[in-house]
Amino acid sequence: MTGPGHEGPVGVIVSVDPDRFAEVVRAARAAGLAVTGEQPLLGSLSGTIAEDRIPVLEAVDGVEAVDRERIVGIPPPDSPLQ
Amino acid sequence: MTNGPMGRPPNGEHPERADVPLMPHATEYTGRYVVLLDQRETERGLDALRSSAGIASVERVRGTEVTGAAELLQRPDVSVLFDELGAAVVEVQPDQRHTLVTTAQTEPTIIAAEPERMVYASVITEPQRTLTGFFPTYRSDEGEVDRHTRAELAASLGPAWDEQNTTWGQQAIRANISHLTGRGVKVAVLDTGVATGHPDLAGCLELTASFVPGESVEDTHGHGTHCIGTVAGPAKPAHAPRYGVAGEAKILAGKVLGSRGTGSDGQILAGMAWAIAHGARVISMSLGSQVQPGELFPQTYENVARRALQRGTVIIAAAGNESRRPGLVVPVGRPANCPSVLAVAALDKDLSTAFFSCGAINGQGGEVNIAAPGVGVLSAAPGDTYQSLRGTSMACPHAAGVLALLAQGHPEDSGAGLRSRLLSGAYPLPQPAEDVGAGLLQAP
């Protein structure tokens, strides 16, 4: 169990300045982001971070947006509506 | 059926009515032609029409000369050129109409020619609005009238398509009569992968990759294979009617959804970057998650989509299937709700909005951009077979295929250029834009 105010990590996707990608990724890591995927071409990242650290990540210079990651689902194969 | 423009009646009488009994205002033609000319060389285009089709002598009119123009247009012995518009209303003998159209097609300074129509103020309470559209392209009378008649038939008769040779969806978007094939244009389909051994698809698969940990690109779900078939199934499949839009497009099949149909935003972003790095002009995403009324679009996807557009790649996504019409209309899902991502709604066989198709409940990108066939859609399935499915997931790859045709025809177009070409080519439908956006998807 975790104590109050210290929640488990959540999935996020992050938009960063592609012109200084490596630098911003370093700063995002320092803010607590565990990076699981990075796309320098598009300036995007995916990763996990403690929920209470999201405001810190959002404040990192060069971070443009942070969105909570979602699971995308389509219906099972036998469903007629896809 | 004879639907050609009728002869021009003597002045003062009503023009004859074309024999299109389906609509309250059947299309009526005046017998004249509207010709759009290259504004720098209007005289050359008119000369060509004079010498080939023997059009009546031309009077030039400036925009300020209102009364003069009205009088001139009444005269059967005079053609009128509107100087500022580079457009002329041309009088031509009935037996010379075909020659006029042929001349328009071969003369480079003539941009378009189409039969002039009678226009009515629209009656708001009219239950079935007349389907209208202006296509500044070359069409003979027969083609134009036939196209309208078919669309009107579709709207009034409902699901009465002959699908023996071609699926209704391909017919509705006119892919089967386009001379474009999407040759060489790369289209990424981010989905459940692909049945790599399907005989119809082997030829179109350029590259595959799986972004789902522990799974190969092989599609055991069927969703991705179905979508890829709609984009690039062959023009003449051996064992099915034609079901693919752009038979010579090159597919980049990115697996971002696992065999059970789920995936994460991170996997999708990875697939998008892969697609762009490999030169995709189109990224088709028949996927999404539901959003609440009032919910904002995800900024990360929006930034990515903007950067993709700057690189010449158009991203389209399924609007979502959570509506239950009539009664419940659920907002366009995510990421289709991003302003820079095109949202595709689904139409039923009678061109009505599919009961499940999401609508423009939210602003700021939450609009529907275009609508495409999404019910009773036949396409490829794993196991070298076929299946019929419905969903906005099925509508989306129709639009991806048309974008491939457009990109083939206009390889120099920017991402924004392709996007606007797609939307401006749509065929207006009577439903509100909230449900169908610009209207029915049309192949160029």
Image (cartoon, coloured by chain):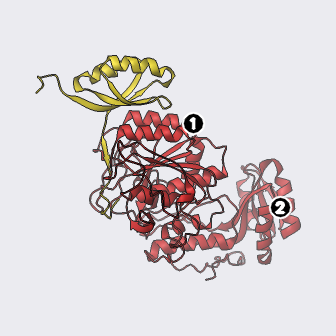
Kind of residue sitting beneath label 2:
Val
The residue wearing badge 2 is B58
Q: Chain of mark 2?
A: B
- How packed mark 1 is, by other alpha carbons closer than 10 Å (few <14, some 14-19, many 20 or more), is some
Toward the viewer: B103 or B217?
Answer: B217
Q: Is residue B23 visible?
A: no
Separation of marks 2 and 1 at Cα, in angstroms:
47 Å
Toward the viewer: B187 or B115?
Answer: B187
Sequence-earlier tag: 2 or 1: 2
What residue is shown at x 86% (from left), y 62% (from top)?
B48
Locate the N terminus of chain B by quadrant: bottom right
Quadrant in the picture for residue B246: bottom right
Camera-side mark, 2 or 1: 1
What residue is shown at x 40% (from left), y 53% (from top)?
B434
Chain B appears what colour?
red
Q: Is residue B96 left or right of residue B365?
A: right
In the rendered image, the residue lying farthest to the right is: B51
Element type where label 1 sits in the image? loop
Locate the C terminus of chain B by quadrant: bottom right
Q: Which chain is yellow?
A: A
The residue wearing badge 1 is B311
Kind of residue sitting beneath label 1:
Arg
In the rendered image, the residue lying farthest to the bottom is: B1
B51, above or below B86, in the image: below
